[in-house]
Image (cartoon, rainbow, N blue to C red):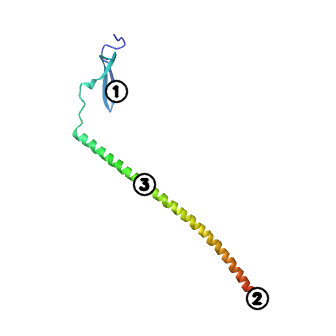
Amino acid sequence: MFPHLPMAPVIFPVNIDSELYCARICFHFFEGKPAIMSVNAIREAPEATADNLQALEQKIYRTIELLKTAREATTAAERDSGRLREQLEMREEELETLRSENMALRREREDVRSRVEKLLGQIEALAEE
């Protein structure tokens, strides 16, 4: 029938979640191929206790709350960042305006100084006469 298959069941150990499960080649066929079936298939999986489910539910709720808090913090940080960028732009514009005014006042001071020196020179010339 299938000469490559031994007549005795073959067990393949596999580690899943730190528990050892074994698969067995059964001599039942699915679409003309041998089927692999868990040795533990007859044994029912241990049911989760209410405590385990409740603990899992609490972890999920805490995770959801942490996610909400993180999203709110991100939104607040983005809002603050935008506000601070606007303030920075305003301050940079104000700084540029103040620098321009300062340069204009220095030029005006130099003009006034030169005119005063000229007037003082004329006064000294009149006083010497």
* Residue tagged 1: 14
Q: Give the vertical position of 37 relative to 113 (above or below).
A: above
| Mark 2 neighbour density, 10 Å: few (under 14) some (14–19) many (20 or more) | few
Give, as a three-letter code, the residue at label 2: Glu
Q: Give the vertical position of 33 relative to 46 (above or below).
A: above
| Tag 1 secondary structure | strand
Q: Give the vertical position of 116 relative to 25 (above or below).
A: below
- Left or right of 81: which side holds 3? left
At which x and y percent is residue 45?
25, 30
- Classify the position of the C terminus by image quarter: bottom right
* Residue tagged 2: 128
Give, as a three-letter code, the residue at label 3: Ala
Q: Give the vertical position of 23 relative to 70 (above or below).
A: above
| Mark 3 neighbour density, 10 Å: few (under 14) some (14–19) many (20 or more) | few
Which label belongs to residue 25? none
Q: Residue at x 37, y 13 (%)?
A: 4
Q: CA distance from mark 2 to mark 1?
A: 117 Å
Q: Of callouts 3 and 2, which one flags the residue occurring earlier in the amino acid sequence? A: 3
At which x and y percent is residue 26?
30, 18
Q: CA distance from mark 1 to mark 3?
A: 48 Å
